[in-house]
Image (cartoon, rainbow, N blue to C red):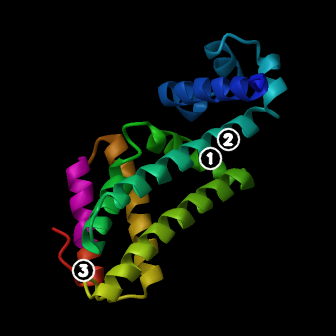
Amino acid sequence: MPRPNRRAERRLAILEAARDVAVREGAEGTTLRAIATACGMEPSAVLYYFDGLGDLVRELVYAASDRFIETIRSAVAGASDPVDRLVAAIEAGSTGGLAGDESRILYEFWSLGLRDPLLNDADHALDRRQVEIYREIIDEGVGTGAFRPRLDVDRVAWALVALEDGLVMDILAGTKTRDEVTALIRSVASAMLDADLG
């Protein structure tokens, strides 16, 4: 029977504590001391597992990105045709990261990417993954005749991701509801694809 990897287990526990701190305190309150306190450790002990707060935050953001993409992929997999898949992708892309706080984490740390190239890379990688999901759905819809894009498919996909990025902030800030945001994105997608997305 293989021995449990205690280092990997401890890293995961620290990341989970960091996630809790980030959701509760925001980016400004996500300090090495706050994370260490949340997992019952000294800050110096946390540094045994991570190469500093920046390393820990980057791992936190990548983990949130992975969970967010999995939420979208799961929603899309449960839909039966390109129209339903696109609606599912819009719904999950706009609101799927809210229940597990992925969206809050991603938005809290987004501005740090302006100074941290590795965090900036994480944001761009997430965008590219979302665009790929949209591109696959739209290409399939074009093939079946469900979509008649008025723009290049890549531009439509990037525009939908950009809309999500901007409008999810409104949900988090409480200035728009989930329904308002998803309805707005569906209406723009309908216009760009000459399709009825409800």
Q: Which residue is mark 1?
A: 62
Categorize mark 2 by other alpha carbons within 10 Å: few (<14), some (14-19), many (20+).
some
Q: Give the residue furthest to the top.
A: 40
Question: Which circle's residue, 3 or 1, is located before the other in the chain?
Answer: 1
Question: Which numbered circle lies on residue 191?
Answer: 3
Disc number lying in front (2 or 3) = 2
Q: Is residue 147 visible?
A: yes
Task: Calculate the distance from the C-alpha at mark 2 to the C-alpha at mark 1.
Answer: 5 Å
Task: Calculate the distance from the C-alpha at mark 2 to the C-alpha at mark 3.
Answer: 38 Å
Question: Which numbered circle lies on residue 59?
Answer: 2
**Three-letter amino acid code at disc 3?**
Ala
Residue 49 left/right relative to 30: right
What residue span does the magenta drawing correspond to?
177-188
Q: Give the residue furthest to the front.
A: 1
Q: Give the answer, above or below, for where 56 lies relative to 61.
A: above
Q: Give the answer, above or below, for where 81 lies relative to 103.
A: below
Task: Calculate the distance from the C-alpha at mark 3 to the C-alpha at mark 1.
Answer: 33 Å
Disc number lying in front (3 or 1) = 1
Circle 2 — which element? helix
Q: Quadrant of residue 9?
A: top right
Q: Quadrant of residue 188?
A: bottom left
- Quarter occupied by the N terminus: top right
Categorize mark 3 by other alpha carbons within 10 Å: few (<14), some (14-19), many (20+).
some
Categorize mark 1 by other alpha carbons within 10 Å: few (<14), some (14-19), many (20+).
some
Q: Quadrant of residue 7?
A: top right
Q: Percent x, y for residue 57? A: 67, 38
